Amino acid sequence: MANDKRTMTLNLTDAEMVALEGLAQKKELSKTALIRQALRLYQLIDQRTSQGEKLMFEDDKLQKKAEVMVL
Amino acid sequence: MSARPIELIRKATRDFVPGILHSELRVQELVLVERRWAVERARVMAALLGAGVPRPQWPESLHWDWSSKASELQLLMASGFGVWCDEDWQGVMLTKTVGYSAALGQDEGKPVVYVDFVESAPWNWTIRAIEQEPRFKGIGSLLIREAIEQSLKEEFHGRVGLHALPQAESFYGKVCGMTMVNADQDKQGLVFFEFTRQQAEQFRSAGGKR
């Protein structure tokens, strides 16, 4: 079943853990839910960039546009 | 696919008919949905043309093609739901959990379950111009309620967002009780509607109706 869960141990540095906890608090998600969201987003970006599309950040106020390089 | 039993109301007899709500639809199911519905779309279109109904009055999803949306289900962020009853797909929905966030109140910037597409089977559309009554009622409400359930499971607290076709705006605003946020120029001017966590709970506790 696609919804069956598997457990893993995640080793993070202090800085990474602080970032994870901060984002989880900001978005009101558990750390597991936040990492799940991050994985979904990464998969989406990887799929679209693999097809030749570009990921851009745009700031209307500063009239700035920058391409994000995804590795 | 995972599934749970539901009941639909057959409009003609007002009987409850057992059905199944499937989550985790796969690509092949959406392709099969469209194979079945395409015939009905053609029937509806022929009837509308025959009755001389002006195009702005045609159902706005008449041109949709679920088989073209099916590949989205290969991504983790996408989920497919379908209502099966009377040996047919009575309605389907495609949701996404990435790319959209809440715009309202304390939850601004927090994730929502985004309803990318939701549609009842063509035989469930009310089209007065050709005297078509729906075979089953309440498919849209049922599926929107399922989006709320998904939002709760994802820890999004019931928050749901969607861009409504103009013909569906009153359904989302008045029947569901969602807040009309704004017309989105990035989405052909379609209006973005949002369920706050409180509105979602109200809709849910009312059994999918307000």
Image (cartoon, rainbow, N blue to C red):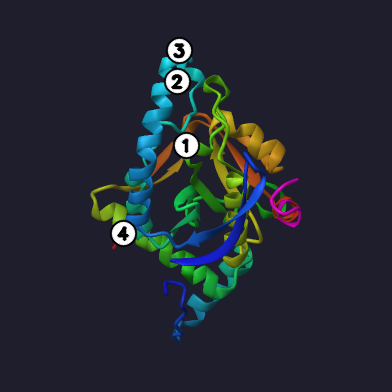
> Camera-side residue: B109 or A1?
A1
In this picture, residue B67 sits left or right of residue B47: left
Mark 4 against mark 2, which lies toward the viewer?
Answer: 2
How many other residues sit within 10 Å of disc 4, few (<14), some (14-19) or many (≥20)?
A: some
Instruction: Work out whether mark 1 precedes mark 2 in sequence or the reverse, and give the earlier one.
Output: 2
Residue B208 x/y as whole percent: 69, 51
**Mark 4: which amino acid?**
Asp
Q: Secondary structure at mark 1?
A: helix
Give amino acid for label 1: Pro
Where does residue B72 sit, x and y in percent of width and height?
36, 53
The label on residue A58 is none
**Amino acid type, residue under disc 3 in the picture:** Gly
Residue B103 visible in this rendered orientation of the protein: no
Mark on residue B122? 1
Around disc 2, counting alpha carbons within 10 Å, would you say few (fewer than 14), some (14 to 19), or many (20 or more)? some
Is label 4 on the same chain as label 1? Answer: no
Classify residue B159 by image quadrant: bottom right
Residue tagged 2 = B48
Which residue is located at x 60 percent, y 50 percent?
A: B144
For residue B1, say whether it is visible: yes
Q: Residue B52, labelled with which disc?
A: 3
Main SS class of the magenta portion in the image: loop
Q: Which residues are magenta?
A: B203-210
The image shows residue B76 at horizontal and vertical percentages of: 40, 63
Q: Quick one: label 3 or label 1, which is nearer the N terminus?
A: 3
